[in-house]
Image (spheres, helix red, strand yellow):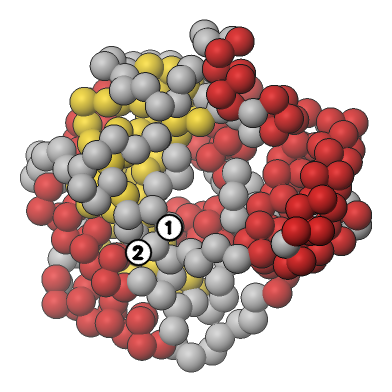
């Protein structure tokens, strides 16, 4: 059994993925046994070819490339990667638009997990491309968070809702960490079934950390002594359809963890909010109509993805 299996998803951003692969290979100690599983999430043939050529040039047995014939999203893409990993003690789910700052970041996270029995998930501190602090933690997605908002909750309940913008000095238990770098205990992850693939995009981290806590009594930590750079959503161009997907995922997440009443209240809140938004921004009428329909999973972008036979 090896120590770490790192899974990286590529979607039409091969240049970032190549940089991430090189960074991991250059900065991971030879004392750490690991492999990299790269999942191409149905990128264009040109992008995939660029990535495949680079991995061939690297010629490292620890780097595997898996090609999906369909864009299956974040959670399912990572789960496809899991299907192709060797037996391991830890998974590292790493966005392709990241670079390691700390030397042997993977080894450092492995050591932290070994020394912290209640840890199920941990993450290094995220930095921007200029190595400035970037918010890495967040509060569980919920009705309370959406209505009362993060800053108010942090002021009223500072021990439960930690200040996301503070620079932590020591490893600290948090609700969840950003999905750009999640280092996960493999046994606990496998036991709870991994990522919920009903979520095409958004809220996978909140859902995973909540289930990890509920089902295996494992906590999520930020480990601030270790750092990485994240270029932030390099493969995602924000538009109204992604905002619609975000609401579909959030309402699904709310019902799953808090029940149908909280989902109904949150959906009603969004209907009122985005009706007035749409009066100013007409593009939001699509979102408003979706919310009137209850934003069901059947409207997810997941069900609009075509299968591509071009490999």
Residue 85's spot in the image, x, y percent?
38, 55
Can I make out residue 102 in this image? Answer: yes
**Quadrant of the snapshot with the C terminus:** bottom left
Q: Residue at x 24, y 39 (%)?
A: 132
Residue 288: image location, x then y, percent: 83, 57
Which mark, by number, is residue 38?
A: 2
Which of disc 1 and disc 2 is earlier in sequence? 2
Residue that carries the numbered disc 1 in the rendered image: 233
How many labels were placed on the picture? 2
Q: Is residue 300 above or below residue 40?
A: above
Spot occupied by residue 89 in the image (x, y as percentages of width and height): 34, 36
Whole-number angstrom distance, CA of label 2 to CA of label 1: 17 Å
Q: Secondary structure at mark 2?
A: strand
SS for tag 1? Answer: loop
> Quadrant of residue 255 in the image?
top right
Q: Is the residue marked by circle 1 packed among few (<14), some (14-19), or many (20+) residues within 10 Å?
A: few
- Of 36 and 54, nearer the camera is 54
Query: Of residues 229 and 122, which is closer to you in this image?
Result: 229
Residue 124 at least partly seen: no
Q: Position of residue 133 (x, y in %)?
A: 29, 35
């Amino acid at each position: 059994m090896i120590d770490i299996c790192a899974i990286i998803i590529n979607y039409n951003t091969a240049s970032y993925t190549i940089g991430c692969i090189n960074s991991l290979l250059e900065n991971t100690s030879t004392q750490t046994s690991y492999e990299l599983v790269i999942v191409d999430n149905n990128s264009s043939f040109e992008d995939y070819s660029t990535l495949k050529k680079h991995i061939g040039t690297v010629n490292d047995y620890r780097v595997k490339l898996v090609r999906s014939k369909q864009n299956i999203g974040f959670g399912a893409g990572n789960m496809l990667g899991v299907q192709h990993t060797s037996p391991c003690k830890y998974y590292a789910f790493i966005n392709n638009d990241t670079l390691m700052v700390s030397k042997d970041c993977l080894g450092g996270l492995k050591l932290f997990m070994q020394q912290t029995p209640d840890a199920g998930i941990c993450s290094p501190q995220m930095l921007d491309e200029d190595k400035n602090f970037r918010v890495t933690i967040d509060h569980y997605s919920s009705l309370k968070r959406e209505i009362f908002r993060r800053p108010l909750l942090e002021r009223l309940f500072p021990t439960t809702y930690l200040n996301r913008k503070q620079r932590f000095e020591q490893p600290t238990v948090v609700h969840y960490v950003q999905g750009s770098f999640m280092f996960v205990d493999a046994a606990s992850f496998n036991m709870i079934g991994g990522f919920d693939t009903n979520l095409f995009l958004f809220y996978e981290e909140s859902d995973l950390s909540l289930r990890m806590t509920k089902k295996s009594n494992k906590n999520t930590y930020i480990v601030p002594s270790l750092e990485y750079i994240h270029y932030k959503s390099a493969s995602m161009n924000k538009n109204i359809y992604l905002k619609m997907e975000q609401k579909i995922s959030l309402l699904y997440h709310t019902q799953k963890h808090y029940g149908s009443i909280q989902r109904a209240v949150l959906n009603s809140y969004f209907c009122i909010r985005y009706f007035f938004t749409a009066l100013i921004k007409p593009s939001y009428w699509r979102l408003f109509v979706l919310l009137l329909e209850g934003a069901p999973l059947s409207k997810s972008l997941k069900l609009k993805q075509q299968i591509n036979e071009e490999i």
